[in-house]
Image (spheres, rainbow, N blue to C red):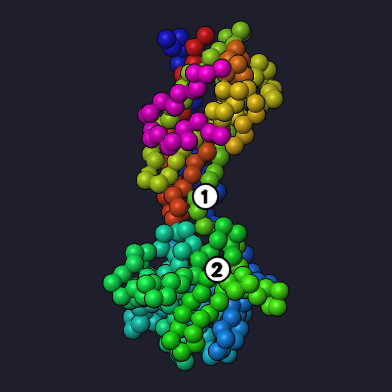
Amino acid sequence: MWKKLLSAIVVGTGLAVALIIVFVQTSSSATNISATNRWAWSDVSGWWDFYHYGNVEVSTSSISGYASSSIAEISLDCHTSPSGDICGTSNYQVTNPDGSGNLSGCAWNDTVGWISFWCGDGDCDGSSVEDASSVCSNSNYRVTIDANGLFQGYAWNEIDGWISFNCANDNSCGDSDYKVETSWRPGKLTGTLDSSIFDTDVSGGANLNSVIWQGSQPSGTCTKFQIAVSNSSGGPWNYWGPDAACDGSGDTGGYFGASCPGPDSPIVISDCDRAWIKNNRYLRYRVLLESNTAQNLTPRVDDVILNWSR
């Protein structure tokens, strides 16, 4: 039975602003390509330099700008071609359709024509879905960006042949150590916020039962919590997750609500031995907000309710 209810209200507008600061990626220049790791290779046209013009930028949906090469510029996006926005006459783009670094679409070069970044996108529309004109059954290639921001794999052009984005593709790094690297990273973005200190006014300590949060959680996003307890208002504050609730050891990587229950769904604190969380007068929580993979949606937390008993 719940003896008492504590309601911790987080001001919605303040939290939203904090999330925007965390989730928006910025760059000090017009490119997020490495000044060192900037080279792709073609056996026909030689080196392609993705840093030279300082305008190639990887985002959660596309790649814009143009690279330099011996066959003139390699345009990655009709909006940012060397001639400006030409999408009215030729609509093309290299895309990052699911925000995970699996590239699609086509680039353009005036000398050799279309440059395909994925065998599954035969019509060059930049879709993440393999289309009817796919050639993957004959030649399975794709340019990807890994968790470290390194391009992997090959692009293809009928005249220029294979364009390699990383020497690791053919184990040639010992002879020629080249690659293309971006500061952009695929996957979900996260932001955290620590609560103020809550005094249960129970001198012998209280027992936290569950956490309920209110707000919105768009598809693909997640809201999780860690708990810190102390018998001193000065801490120390060790934020732990469910494994610590069971064995009492410091679990800094685990979170209550890892299954991503939505708002108004109680996140129950484990029923197993949780001596570290019992009989402590003061409580705090850490809320972790996780974006979707495309990094364009985030949860919003308006209120957090801690259910505790004596």
Residue at the spot 45% in from the left edge and 52% down from the top edge: 293
**Residue designated by label 2:** 152
Crowding near pointer 1: few (<14 within 10 Å), some, many (20+)?
many
* Residue holding disc 1: 189
Q: Is residue 306 above or below residue 150?
A: above
Q: Is residue 300 above or below residue 93?
A: above
Mark 1 is on which residue type?
Leu
> Which residue is found at the position 60% from the left and 29% from the top?
240
Which percent across, then down, holds residue 168?
62, 70
Q: Residues within 10 Å of mark 2 (few under 14, many from 20)?
A: many
Query: Nearest the camera: 294 or 28?
Result: 294
Is label 2 in contact with label 1 (beta carbons under 8 Å)?
no
- Residue 283: image location, x then y, percent: 58, 21
Does residue 269 show up magenta in the picture? yes
Does dot 2 land on a helix, a strand or a loop?
strand
109 in relation to 194, above or below: below
Q: Is residue 8 magenta?
A: no
Q: Kindly identify the residue that appears in the image at 57 percent across and 23 percent down.
A: 245
Placement of the N terminus among the 4 image quadrants? top left
Q: Is residue 85 visible?
A: no
Question: What's the magenta bit mostly, secondary-structure-wise?
Answer: loop
